[in-house]
Amino acid sequence: MSEERQALVRGATRFIAIVGDPISQVLSPEIYNPRLVKANALLLPLHVPSSTFETVMPSLRRIANLAGLVFTVPFKERAIPFADEVLPAGRQIGAINAMRPGADGRWTADMFDGTGLVRALERLDATPAGRRVLLIGAGGAGRAIAIALARARASALTIFDVDQGKLKRLADDVRRFYPTCAITTPERVDAARHDIVINATPVGMTAGDGFPAPLGALDSATVVFDIVPTPTMTPLMAHAAAAGCRTGGGRLMIESQAEAVLEFLGFVSSAPSYAHHAK
């Protein structure tokens, strides 16, 4: 990677660590580091075995040139006790994916998975405010996205998941946190009744996958977003594009999330977006 894409490491270079187990699969370094060139900073992957996470975290917090921590699976919930303050989204979701140190040595944390999705929709000219959204998946990613959509003033949110326990818990929490957002949890979904359709499940990541749920007909005015981070279009995205829908994928969400995380950590993105979407 050239100097234009990544900062040279010097004595004054600051670091952001992305912590996970495993870590080799993450796309974050190639997305964050071009945006950190002018700040003389780098994001580095740290493979912290799950069995040692609680032992390692206090030492990481003491590194003086560490500008922040980013968490991926399986640490988004386990990292919470190491934050001195968790901001509202992180508290509502019950998970975090970024922490920043303050001048007083205290660490502040928040969750940006849902923020990345909302910003990605805005890039597609599909701001959630006032729109009807169908969300497929009530797991960790789905929970963060649902709360972010309600926070962004979506008028109605239909949530679908085969796990009734997760589904009920998420629906109840969104109603409690954001009572003006109408929540429904039908046994079957009808994409045609929604302005935005989002897949927040892993379906589409593996070759041979179909759709995450039977959707019915798609209206060409519907925006379809699949968070699966594949380099090609998922079956859902290809189906939506064939129907004339605007589509967005996991790469666009990750890029949008990266910009939000860097702002939270005190950096300004210094690289153009590499995002693309199909119509």
Image (spheres, helix red, strand yellow):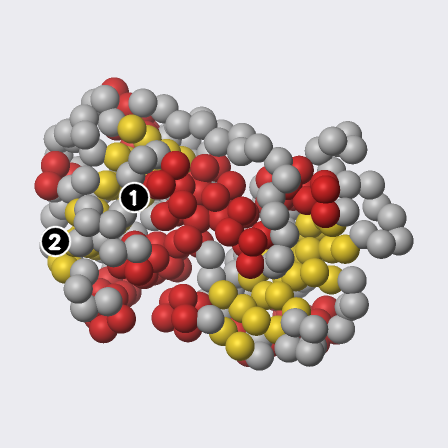
> Residue flagged by tag 1: what amino acid is it?
Thr
Q: Residue visible at 29% across and 28% down?
A: 246
**Image depth: mark 2 or mark 1 in front:** 1
Q: Residue visible at 72% across and 69% down?
A: 60
On the question of residue 228 being in view, the answer is: no
Q: Quadrant of residue 79?
A: bottom right
- SS at circle 1: loop
Count up the numbered dots: 2
Calculate the distance from the C-alpha at mark 2 to the C-alpha at mark 1.
Answer: 27 Å
Q: Is residue 141 above or below residue 164?
A: above
Image coords of residue 184 (percent x, y): 13, 58
- SS at circle 2: loop
Q: Is residue 27 above or below residue 153?
A: above
Image coords of residue 8 (percent x, y): 82, 41
Q: Is residue 154 above or below residue 279?
A: below
152 sits left or right of 123 in the view? left
Residue denoted by label 2:
187
Residue denoted by label 1:
127
